[in-house]
C-alpha cells in the first residue's frame, strides 16, 4: 500500500502459507531469509508470500519463523500518536496561531504516511479466500461495529438521537471504508501500466466533482487513493533511501521551513484542503484549483512523509511492539476525544493557554499509547479481529494445511 495479478484458479499451485488474522491495517513481517530472496521477491510478476505482507501479528516480534521489521512498527506507532494529538488540537487551535501552524504541518503527512505503509503491505493481496476472509473480519466487521458504536456513544452521553448509517462513515471510520475499497482494487493496480499516475488522475478528477456525495466518504477515499497506490508501487529499497544519515540531516531544515510556512499560511489558507473530503467547489474555490491543490498537497505531503520516515528509528524501541496495535489506538481514542468534546472539557480557558495545550497533547499521546497495548488488544479483539469461523465455509487449502501440521506434530512425537 508491484505484484502481478495472481494466476488462474485452474492451474495447480502449492498451498498458500498459513497466516494470522489481520487487524485491518497490514503489519510488516519480514522473513529471516528475506535478504537472500529480496531481489527475486520484489521483481514485478512475482507474488509475495502472503504471510510476509498480508496480515497483522499481535504478540511478539516473531511468529512462525517470521520477524517484524521494527522500522515499520515504529513508523505506525509514531504516526498514530500524531493522529491522536492532531485530533486533540482541533478544539484548541483556533486560539493559537502557532498550534494551528503545527496542526497544519502534521495533517499534511501523518495520514499519508500511514496510508503509504498500508499500501506497501497490501502488495500481495488478491482474491484468495483466506485473504478475503481477513478483509471481512479485520475491516468490514470493525467498520460495522464502530460505525454503530460512535453514534450510540453520542446518544448515551449527550441524550441526542443520532442515527446509525452504514453509508455515512462517522468520524474515524472513513479509513476502514477506504482500506476496504483500496484493497479490493489492489489486483487492478497490479495490472495497470502506470498505476500511480492513474490514481493521481482519479484524485484530481474527484477534487472537481462535488456530486460524488457523502456516501461511504468516497471523496476522501478517492483523494487519498494515490498514497495507497504509491505504497503498492514501492519496494523495500525505496524506504532504505530515506533512512540514510544525509536524509535525516536534511529533514531538519525541511521541517523547520514547513513549520514557518504553516504559521504563515494560517490566516491565508483553508486547512480543509488537508482533509481531502471536499471538492474545490464545496470549499468555495474555483474548479481549477482542485487539481492544482491536489498536486501541490501531494508534493508537500510526500516531502514531509519522506522526512518523517527519515526520523523513524530503525532499531527496536520500547514502543516498537505497539505498532501491532495501531488500529486499536486509532479507533478507540476517538471515544476519548468525543467524550471530552461532549462534556465541554476543551472549553476550559486554561487549556487554551500554552501550558494547557502541552498537557492536552501529552495526555492524548499517552492515551493512544495505552490503547495500543496488548491488554487493550485482548479486551477488544472481539471487535477488531473476530475469528468468526462459524460464518465461513472451510477452505480446502486451510484444511490441508491443518492436516499437514498435525502429521508433522505426530512425526515429532514419534521421533
Image (cartoon, rainbow, N blue to C red):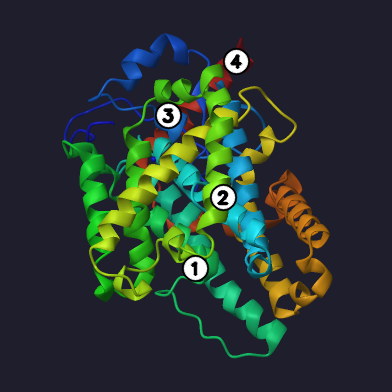
N-term mark: 2 or 3 = 3
Q: Which residue is labeled 1 in the image?
A: 144
Q: Nearer the viewer, mark 1 or mark 3?
A: 1
Q: Is residue 4 left or right of residue 258?
A: left
Disc 1/disc 3 C-alpha distance (Å): 29 Å
- The answer to which image quadrant residue 121 occupies is top left
N-term mark: 4 or 2 = 2
Element class at badge 3: loop
Q: Is residue 185 left or right of residue 392?
A: left
N-term mark: 1 or 3 = 3
Q: Which residue is labeled 2 in the image?
A: 106
Q: Nearer the viewer, mark 4 or mark 2?
A: 2
Q: Nearer the viewer, mark 2 or mark 3?
A: 2
Q: Which mark is on residue 412?
A: 4
N-term mark: 3 or 4 = 3
Q: Nearer the viewer, residue 270 or 414?
A: 270
Amino acid at each position: 500500500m508491484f505484484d502481478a495479478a495472481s494466476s488462474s484458479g485452474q492451474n495447480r499451485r502449492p498451498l498458500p502459507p498459513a497466516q494470522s488474522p489481520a487487524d485491518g491495517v497490514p503489519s510488516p513481517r519480514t522473513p529471516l531469509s528475506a535478504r537472500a530472496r529480496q531481489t527475486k521477491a520484489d521483481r514485478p510478476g512475482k507474488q509475495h508470500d502472503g504471510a510476509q505482507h498480508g496480515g497483522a501479528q499481535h504478540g511478539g516480534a516473531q511468529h512462525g519463523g517470521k520477524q517484524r521489521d521494527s522500522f515499520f512498527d515504529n513508523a505506525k506507532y509514531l504516526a498514530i500518536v500524531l493522529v491522536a494529538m492532531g485530533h486533540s488540537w482541533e478544539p484548541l487551535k483556533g486560539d493559537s496561531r502557532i498550534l494551528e501552524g503545527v496542526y497544519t504541518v502534521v495533517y499534511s503527512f501523518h495520514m499519508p504516511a500511514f496510508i503509504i505503509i498500508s499500501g506497501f503491505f497490501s502488495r500481495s493481496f488478491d482474491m484468495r479466500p483466506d485473504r478475503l476472509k481477513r478483509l471481512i473480519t479485520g475491516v468490514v466487521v470493525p467498520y460495522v461495529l464502530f460505525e454503530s458504536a460512535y453514534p450510540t456513544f453520542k446518544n448515551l452521553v449527550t441524550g441526542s438521537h443520532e442515527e446509525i448509517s452504514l453509508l455515512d462513515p462517522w468520524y474515524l471510520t472513513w479509513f476502514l471504508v477506504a482500506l476496504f475499497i483500496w484493497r479490493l482494487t489492489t489486483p487492478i493496480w497490479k495490472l495497470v501500466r502506470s498505476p500511480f499516475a492513474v490514481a493521481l488522475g482519479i484524485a484530481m478528477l474527484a477534487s472537481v466533482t462535488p456530486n460524488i456525495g457523502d456516501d461511504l466518504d468516497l471523496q476522501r477515499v478517492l483523494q487519498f487513493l494515490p498514497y495507497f497506490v504509491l505504497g503498492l508501487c514501492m519496494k523495500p529499497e525505496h524506504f532504505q533511501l530515506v533512512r540514510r544519515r544525509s536524509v535525516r540531516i536534511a529533514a531538519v531544515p525541511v521541517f523547520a521551513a514547513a513549520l514557518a510556512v504553516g504559521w504563515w499560511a494560517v490566516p491565508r489558507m483553508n486547512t480543509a484542503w488537508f482533509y481531502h473530503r471536499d471538492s474545490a467547489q464545496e470549499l468555495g474555490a474555483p474548479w481549477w484549483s482542485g487539481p492544482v491543490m491536489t498536486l501541490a498537497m501531494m508534493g508537500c505531503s510526500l516531502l514531509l512523509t519522506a522526512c518523517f520516515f527519515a526520523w523513524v528509528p530503525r532499531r527496536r524501541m520500547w514502543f516498537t511492539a505497539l505498532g501491532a496495535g495501531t488500529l486499536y489506538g486509532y479507533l478507540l481514542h476517538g471515544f476519548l476525544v468525543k467524550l471530552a468534546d461532549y462534556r465541554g472539557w476543551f472549553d476550559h480557558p486554561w487549556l487554551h493557554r500554552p501550558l494547557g495545550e502541552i498537557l492536552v497533547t501529552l495526555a492524548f499521546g499517552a492515551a493512544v499509547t495505552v490503547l495500543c497495548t496488548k491488554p487493550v488488544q485482548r479486551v477488544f479483539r472481539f471487535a477488531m479481529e473476530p475469528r468468526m469461523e462459524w460464518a465461513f465455509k472451510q477452505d480446502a487449502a486451510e484444511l490441508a494445511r491443518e492436516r499437514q501440521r498435525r502429521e508433522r506434530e505426530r512425526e515429532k512425537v514419534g521421533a
